[in-house]
Image: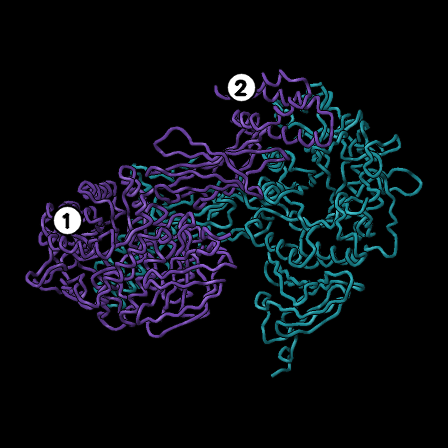
Chain colours: A cyan, B purple
Amino acid sequence: MSRGNQVPSSALTSEGRLRVAIEHVEPEVDGGRYPIKRELGDTIVVQADLFADGHDVIRGLLRSRHEHQDEWLETPLSFSGNDRWQASFEVRELGHYRYSIIGWVDHFATWQRDMRKRLIAQQDVTVDILIGTQLIEKAYGHASDTSRRRLKDIQAAVSRCDPRSQAELDLLLGEEAAEVMADCVDHRLSSSYDRELLVVVDRPKARFSAWYEMFPRSTTDEDQPHGTFKDCESRLSYIAEMGFDVLYLPPIHPIGETHRKGPNNNPRGDSASVGSPWAIGSRNGGHRAIHSQLGSLEDFKQLLAVAREKGIEIALDLAFQCSPDHPYVQEHPEWFMTRPDGTIQFAENPPKQYQDIFPLNFETDAFPELWKELRGVVQYWIDHGIRIFRVDNPHTKPFLFWKWLIGDVKAAYPETIFLAEAFTRPKVMYHLAKVGFTQSYTYFAWRNSKPELTDYFTELTTSPVREFFRPNLWTNTPDILTEHLQHGGRPVFMVRLALAATLGSSYGIYGPAFELYENRPQKPGSEEYLDSEKYEVRRWDITRPDSLKEFIGLINRIRRENPALQSDAHLQFHPIDNDYLMAYSKQSPDGSNVILVVVNLSPHHVHAGWLELDLSALGIHANRPFQVHDLLTHAYYVWQGSRNYVQLDPHSVPVQIFAVRRNLRREQDFDYFL
Amino acid sequence: MSRGNQVPSSALTSEGRLRVAIEHVEPEVDGGRYPIKRELGDTIVVQADLFADGHDVIRGLLRSRHEHQDEWLETPLSFSGNDRWQASFEVRELGHYRYSIIGWVDHFATWQRDMRKRLIAQQDVTVDILIGTQLIEKAYGHASDTSRRRLKDIQAAVSRCDPRSQAELDLLLGEEAAEVMADCVDHRLSSSYDRELLVVVDRPKARFSAWYEMFPRSTTDEDQPHGTFKDCESRLSYIAEMGFDVLYLPPIHPIGETHRKGPNNNPRGDSASVGSPWAIGSRNGGHRAIHSQLGSLEDFKQLLAVAREKGIEIALDLAFQCSPDHPYVQEHPEWFMTRPDGTIQFAENPPKQYQDIFPLNFETDAFPELWKELRGVVQYWIDHGIRIFRVDNPHTKPFLFWKWLIGDVKAAYPETIFLAEAFTRPKVMYHLAKVGFTQSYTYFAWRNSKPELTDYFTELTTSPVREFFRPNLWTNTPDILTEHLQHGGRPVFMVRLALAATLGSSYGIYGPAFELYENRPQKPGSEEYLDSEKYEVRRWDITRPDSLKEFIGLINRIRRENPALQSDAHLQFHPIDNDYLMAYSKQSPDGSNVILVVVNLSPHHVHAGWLELDLSALGIHANRPFQVHDLLTHAYYVWQGSRNYVQLDPHSVPVQIFAVRRNLRREQDFDYFL
């Protein structure tokens, strides 16, 4: 439990001579207890405080390596003031990287620095020169072959000089000597940071993804009662045209019959009811089987293949729970909670009862077998080409189960993405991200006013949370038709889509309910959809001319074309003097792409206001004009200075997505300008 | 280096069933890497985030124990919202305490909670009652003898009831059952925080102390050239009357003769020079010897004894460096740096040279012997009754040396106090405190304007630094006569004294230079005193009628009588609309004692302004009058509301120290009030 470094011991080991202290390494999650998350190709800037007693010159290295490499990559730290040092490394492989910091006193650099001061003060340096040459002599013991050759060259050159001549001093105080000597370090006297820190490196889609959720059974045309994978296949072009790159399907497994729910969550469904896809398992199989009305495994594989051609990856749902008809119930009753009357405990949140669902008992004595079986389920779908899983209610299963399962899967398939569907308390959501989830649902759906949105996204993008929690912003889900969406019609859907797609580099919609702005709740005050697809097959007229399809397609194209919108790292809010108007910018890591979004949050009225841009943060010169180009309407504006007028009409386009161009072409740019 | 908890392993151990996550324990320094500091009798409030998957009821315990105890004290955590829990423990012994947190799912409490909901919903609970009784049955396995008896009583009572009767339910859902069952925990399923955290418990003087620095040789009267311990003895009453409880003496050891400094740091002192006491060691001895002109060891012990009677503790100086005449130089040349010409390296900070000082070489191969010898020096003075050490320039010796030395001393003598005299970069000063120093010098002397003072003391008292860094505020030292003190005369000394004594629960002055407001620098722009006592004997007329002795005595009495001023934990600044006026309050831990200080920072002009008090922080009702009583002038004011007028004249008393009395006696308080 405790670490030995807290209580001093009276033993005097060689550690006593480690003079450099290393503290406050960043990035670091919870004192190094959890990994940070990054994506392939990222450059990770690591900072740390390094200092020693006294006034000697110190040096340090950032050490980094992929977990599969034996050798550390060593990158010299550079000093950035106030005892802070930094260096960076690039992550070029998926999986875990380790990084840490070492530091030591550089006696030769100290000697060089002090010699220069002595020479300026015209002190007698006869003995000091000898000290310098002694340091070079001693360095052989810690020199590589190359360094040894270079040391020899320096020594030979020094010996050819007259003693105490300027030539000798130039050699001893030169760059070459400094450089070679910095490479000859007795690392037994180097301090190491007390923890090796971890990075989980995911593929870029972990950071930048546009999700579309769709019930496969609702893709049917009028002629057949139940959609199939074939129907889904026909729907792929529509989804690709809107620009989504992840298609998430609710569970595709056989649906239980016992206590099957009817339309609108009627607890007594009749035989015509199709049931909830989350009531998984029937005599036809469980989590590895496919609901026969959707088609065969072959059909599914065909769907995956066609989707892949269109740039769409299919995400499956991991809903680790069972209908009473799931084969596990007969084969492994020990994986469930059995009540004293011999019945199996169904799901409940007293007094609510969900008799169509048996939760798995993760506290069972047989938990290793249960966990391995669930791991097997994931492996089954991985074997069939799935690499993205949306995980249903992960907060009702133990954290350590997820840590193990996700860790074990990603050790072999580091490209796998797990999205945590946990709508619960913030610390629980953050903890799921810490233990391994790649992306997480957020409270975005319920953040609608300017202060709410500003506070929440400031927390997600600037607090320590940013190191491990990747937000995925959903406008709606089959469970969540927010009251906000129920009122305000088409404009509110446009605003929420634009917010999700630009505040979040990953976002999702549940369609076609969204693009057709379905907004009827099951009853007033409810967030459930009327005639919810969770319990029945719906037919949608995706060809409706008032569909948001074109708008969504345009927004997704803007996202693809502008790196600024592919990360949340550089989100910044800018004040506007109107509470209904909100503005924020994002920048690409290199700053070359800058997007400014202005939104009218009111679906009812035209709003105008004065925007106060943080020009220096955007890299814009305060005294020069710059251009903003609305990528939605193609309007161009030339602005100058931080204060600019904006006006938005919710009934045309309630949002402006400006590409900011810092340098306007001016007369100076012409060839014939003097 | 790295801890196994970061990378998931595929092994499924029983740990998989630990469902409670424990995070963000506070107080905690650098993720648990260093101990926090507290004082005897303190109550330590520990907070942590605890949460589990799902909706089960969880419980947790704070575990604490003195390092010498084997048994944990277990204190139940109470819930304080947003997944935060807390409990506290009292520290009643000096030394190290450990503390940590454990948490688990309470299945019986979950069952009770759910049962109540089921009963309200009038559900059939026949089977659920059986589940409850089964839980009681299972609890025997983890019950203490007492609990087992109580479980039996409950079971017996239940069995006498009619099945499913109200009486049976009352028993099963009762407080008694909850309480016993909460005590029967299978701790194999309890999670532990991954680190045991440490508290260093010091005596209260570590937090609350008033220091007086004095050169013993400058206590002489006109008849003799050099003061002695006997003279110091005569000075003790004077010091006690001013209210100081620590008397710190610069080094009392034999002073080197080689390169002895003359007055005003003259590098060529003549034979009459007394030299710097920090040039330690002569043929008469080193760090364990006493400078013969001061007296004998017996005289010193006598001084200690008399001081103790007067409530004054003597602090010695640990200046681990040597004059060229120190016996170590002959006996242990290997403890120094030898130059190629055979000479020993003197101290330098190129181009400055300090030929009267040989630094010890902490990097010597013989460092274990050197360290042990220095430990022996400390032991020697401990054996003679010293328990407070002011450490000279600790930042020029390795951190790990101090960690070892202080740790080793305090393991045997936990009452020992080490004050770090490190005037260097902030992170280095903080690190010395982390590795063990009890108190630390600060930048107070150079913080003079309102924003400077506010920012610095806000950092010291509200940032994480507060957990390990105990500021000791010095108005001046033999090295530091700030430019601020050089201008402004008596009023500036009064202001600086009042600030030091009320902003800091520990503070110090170097006298009699301070109380006689000596303010002549060696040369313009220098912070060195003219005719510094570091290099010569000074005679002070402590009977001067304009001395600040009375003022200092009064301030120190106010400190002793007001617990609010004995800690920095509850310092709070209050705005005033005049940049020369500053106001702040302190409270005792229980809030019963409230002190409000208002200072005129200008030594030149009368200043007045409107003070905006944070009444709720002071526990004052916004609509009721309250009394402020100036403890310096005994003026009484009745104020009401947050906004109050203050005016201070630097030429009478530039500071007001108000005792704030929240409740004024009113007519309602009279017996005859209706």
Q: Quadrant of residue B18?
A: top right
- Farthest residue, direction left: B223
Give coordinates of residue B21: x percent, y percent.
55, 37
**Amino acid on which the number 2 mark rests in the picture:** Gly
Look at mark 1 in the image and give the residue it sits on: B303
**Mark in the foreground, 1 or 2:** 1
Give coordinates of residue B259: x percent, y percent.
14, 60
Q: Is residue A628 above or below residue A74?
A: below
Most foreground residue, B450 or B592: B592
Say which element carries label 2: helix
Q: Quadrant of residue A656?
A: bottom right
Viewport quadrant of the N terminus of chain A: top left
Among the two numbered marks 1 and 2 on one chain, the one whose residue lies closer to the N terminus:
2
Q: Is residue B329 above or below residue A435?
A: below
Look at the image and tell me whether residue B464 can be seen.
Answer: yes
Most foreground residue, B221 or A634: B221
Asked if marks 1 and 2 touch (Cβ < 8 Å), the reply is no
Could you tell me which residue is drawn at 10 percent across and 45 percent down?
B298
Most foreground residue, A62 or B387: B387
The image's mark for residue B141 is 2
The image's mark for residue B429 is none
Viewport quadrant of the C terminus of chain A: bottom right
Say which element carries label 1: helix
Give me the C-alpha separation between circle 1 and circle 2: 64 Å
Read off the chain for label 2. B
Q: Is residue B544 above or below residue A447?
A: below
Give coordinates of residue B437: x percent, y percent.
32, 48
- Farthest residue, direction right: A223
Could you tell me which residue is drawn at 58 percent across and 51 percent down?
A42
**Amino acid on which the number 1 mark rests in the picture:** Leu
